[in-house]
Image (tube, helix red, strand yellow):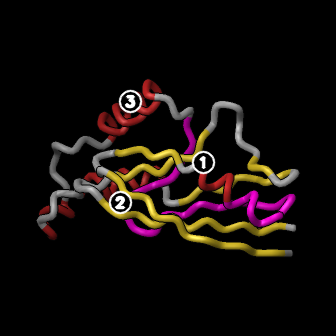
Amino acid sequence: MITESTTITIHTKGLADCQDITPRATEFVGSTGIQRGLFCAFVPGSTAGITTIEYEPGAVRDLTAAIERMVPQTIHYEHDARWGDGNGFSHVRAALLGPSLAVPIARGELQLGTWQQIILVDFDNRPRRREVVFQIVGE
């Protein structure tokens, strides 16, 4: 069993900014020589998440609109009352989406669907420099 890890940096705009990290994930998987196993992408922090989507403008707008309907920015959040930073909504959104994603690897490739990309979603209320940890366990 082999384990390989790396960390990438992404600069985001915040407010549900979606960034396609699939090319970087694919490049990392290819560089390891691992033929089968499990790839994980994890974003440290409590105001961003990782998921998959068909990364095209309409689907991305649909996702951000759905997130706004589920967890609106404009309502009261206890976190804001305590810390005064105005990003309570971003913590709730990130908790619902989750900080990580696992994707199987077969024949040295991520087993994503044809129209499926891995995305980082930054929910914070300001631009951020995000680190994303990639890790593979396999052979």
Residue under numbered circle 3 = 61
Q: Please state which amino acid type lies under the numbered disc 1.
A: Thr
Q: Is residue 21 left or right of residue 68?
A: right
Check residue 47 in the rendering and tell me which mark sits there, or answer none: 2
Indicate the position of residue 22 as horizontal and vertical percent values. 60, 48
Tell me which numbered mark, 3 or 1, is placed earlier along the sequence: 1
Span shown in magenta: 28-53
Q: Please state which amino acid type lies under the numbered disc 2.
A: Thr
CB under 8 Å between discs 3 and 1 = no
Residue at figure coordinates x 49%, y 60% from the top left: 99
* Above or below 53: residue 87: below
Residue at figure coordinates x 75%, y 75% from the top left: 3
Indicate the position of residue 49 as horizontal and vertical percent values. 45, 55
Spatial CA span between label 3 and label 1: 19 Å
* Above or below 12: residue 114: above
Q: Is residue 9 left or right of residue 83?
A: right
Indicate the position of residue 89 as horizontal and vertical percent values. 26, 52
Spatial CA span between label 3 and label 2: 19 Å
CB under 8 Å between discs 3 and 2 = no
Report if residue 47 lies within the magenta region.
yes
Tell me which numbered mark, 3 or 2, is placed earlier along the sequence: 2
Badge nearest the viewer, 3 or 2: 3
- Local SS, label 3: helix
In which quadrant is the C terminus drawn? bottom right
Q: Quadrant of residue 108?
A: bottom right
CB under 8 Å between discs 2 and 1 = no
* Above or below 132: residue 25: above
Residue under numbered circle 1 = 22
Q: Please state which amino acid type lies under the numbered disc 3.
A: Arg
Q: Is residue 58 left or right of residue 125?
A: right
* Above or below 22: residue 43: below
